Image: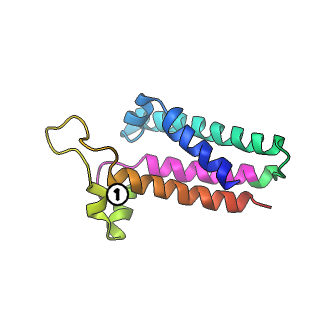
Amino acid sequence: MFAALYAAHLVGDHWAQTSRQAAWKGREGWEGRRACAVHIATLTACKAAAVTALHLSGQQVRPVRTALALAGDAVSHYLADRRSLDPARGLARLAELAGLRDFWKLGAPRPGQDDNPVLGTGAYALDQAFHVGCLWAASVAAAR
């Protein structure tokens, strides 16, 4: 279950998410909420497809537990992705509380730069680690 959900997470979070969703999902207001909600719907559809493939391959899947686990995972992903650039909110705040403020900022663009000079950032690594941890919890909840 975890392997199927993790593979689907990577596809859904990186390939199925549009550039606009990625850029807008953290914005304030309805534009940001909508971009994030559509991203989460697409991401969850990728995970549901992976679980369906798992079931079709002969693995035993408990539909109600799996649906609840995917719903919980979707909520955690939405809340994390709606984070603001404000360091007092969201995962940035969680990183600070965990003593990871400098790691969160690692690789972030400097003022005046349009793009990131490195592949990946501390914020991205911590974001993905949070999502994968929640995904693991979902897979345990869905397991028989």
- Find out whether residue 63 is within the magenta segment: no
Q: Is residue 127 left or right of residue 142?
A: left
Relative depth, front residue between 56 and 144: 56
Residue 48 at what x, y percent from top left?
70, 41
Residue 135 at what x, y percent from top left?
59, 55
Q: Is residue 69 left or right of residue 74?
A: right
Q: Give the residue drawn at x 37%, y 34%.
A: 23
At numbered mark 1, what does the secondary structure look like: helix, strand or loop? helix
Location of the C terminus (image quadrant): bottom right
Under mark 1, the amino acid is Ala
Whether residue 78 is situated above or below residue 11 in the rendered picture: below
How many residues crowd mark 1 within 10 Å: few (<14), some (14–19), many (20+)?
Answer: many
Residue 141 at what x, y percent from top left?
70, 61
* Corner quadrant of residue 100: bottom left
Q: How many marks?
A: 1
Q: Is residue 2 left or right of residue 130?
A: right
- Furthest residue toward left: 112
Residue 140 at what x, y percent from top left?
69, 62
Whether residue 41 is situated above or below residue 96 in the rendered picture: above
Relative depth, front residue between 95 and 120: 120
Q: Give the residue drawn at x 84%, y 52%.
A: 60
What colour-coding does the image apply? rainbow
Q: Give the residue drawn at x 52%, y 49%.
A: 77
- Tell me the residue that label 1 is attached to: 92
- Find out whether residue 75 is within the magenta segment: yes
Magenta-drawn stretch, dominant element (helix, strand or loop): helix
Q: Give the residue drawn at x 56%, y 38%.
A: 12
Q: Which residues are magenta?
A: 66-88
